[in-house]
């Protein structure tokens, strides 16, 4: 019997994602306990930056996309494909492209998995958001020019009670 043949793709994606997120959370927890919140955040953001660059290369390969995006619709297609592979139900995230050159990310109150996890660990007061940093690092790795509003200091869910980010890009078409 082959377990992969018995498991639904969505269930497998949830299982693998939860494993990765649990490892990430335990790594962060131990880094903060060992080194303090400031160094834990620094190490976390640095690891995310390095991981995101590799992740983008792997996503481009598995999705069969071009190396450089010249149009907004190409970037939107890439993001949709990447999120189909990465975002799971437990993350409670919403992503839209409301107009040309605009990408919006939203999490419902108490829905952001990172916020909930770091809050449960007791570190939310000093936490620097790694979720949005990952997305920023994707765009940096893709050499995409963007403006992010609002800029994140800490965790928006903690400071504002919600997390809604708007990215604006500078494609001509």
Image (cartoon, rainbow, N blue to C red):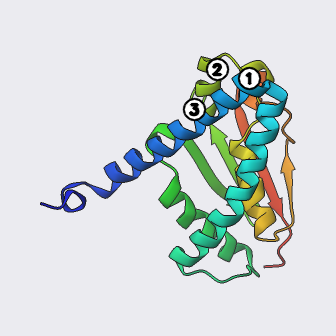
What's the residue at 58%, 70% (across, down)?
A: 58
Camera-side residue: 58 or 146?
A: 58
Question: What's the CA distance linking mark 3 and mark 2?
Answer: 13 Å
In the figure, 84 relative to 37: above or below?
A: below
Going by the image, does 115 lie left or right of 22? right
Which residue is the extreme one toward the front?
34
* Residue 167 sits above or below residue 64 on the image: above
Circle number at residue 158 = 1
- Quadrant where the image shows the N terminus: bottom left
Frontmost of labels 2 and 1 is 2
**Is residue 52 left or right of 93 when viewed as pictured?**
right
- Horizontal side of residue 84 vs 31, given as left or right: left
- Mark 2 and mark 1 residues within 8 Å of each other at the beta carbon: yes
- The residue that appears at 60% across and 80% down in the rendered structure is 65
The location of residue 118, given as percent across then percent down, is 64, 25
Q: Nearer the viewer, residue 79 or 73?
A: 79
Quarter where residue 73 is shown: bottom right
Indicate the position of residue 120 as horizontal and vertical percent values. 59, 18
Mark 1 or 3, closer to the camera: 3
Q: Residue under label 3, please give it.
A: 26
Mark-to-mark CA distance, 1 and 3: 20 Å
Lateral position of residue 53 relative to residue 64, left or right: right
Q: Is residue 92 visible?
A: no
Q: Residue at x 84, y 50 (%)?
A: 148
Q: Which residue is mark 2?
A: 119
Is there CB contact under 8 Å for labels 3 and 2?
no
Secondary element type, mark 1: helix
């Amino acid at each position: 019997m082959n377990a992969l043949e018995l498991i639904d793709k969505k269930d497998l994606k949830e299982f693998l994602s939860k494993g990765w997120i649990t490892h990430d959370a335990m790594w962060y927890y131990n880094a903060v306990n060992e080194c303090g919140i400031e160094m834990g955040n620094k190490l976390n953001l640095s690891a995310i930056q390095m991981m995101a660059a590799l992740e983008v290369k792997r996503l481009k390969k598995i999705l069969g996309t071009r190396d450089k995006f010249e149009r907004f619709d190409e970037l939107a297609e890439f993001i949709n494909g990447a999120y189909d592979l990465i975002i799971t139900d437990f993350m409670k995230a919403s992503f839209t492209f409301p107009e040309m050159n605009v990408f919006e990310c939203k999490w419902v109150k108490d829905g952001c998995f990172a916020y909930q996890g770091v809050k449960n660990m007791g570190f939310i007061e000093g936490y620097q958001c790694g979720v949005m940093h990952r997305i920023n690092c994707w765009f940096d790795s893709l050499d995409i020019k963007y403006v992010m509003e609002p800029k994140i200091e800490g965790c928006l869910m903690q400071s504002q009670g919600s997390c809604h980010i708007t990215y604006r890009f500078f494609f001509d078409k």
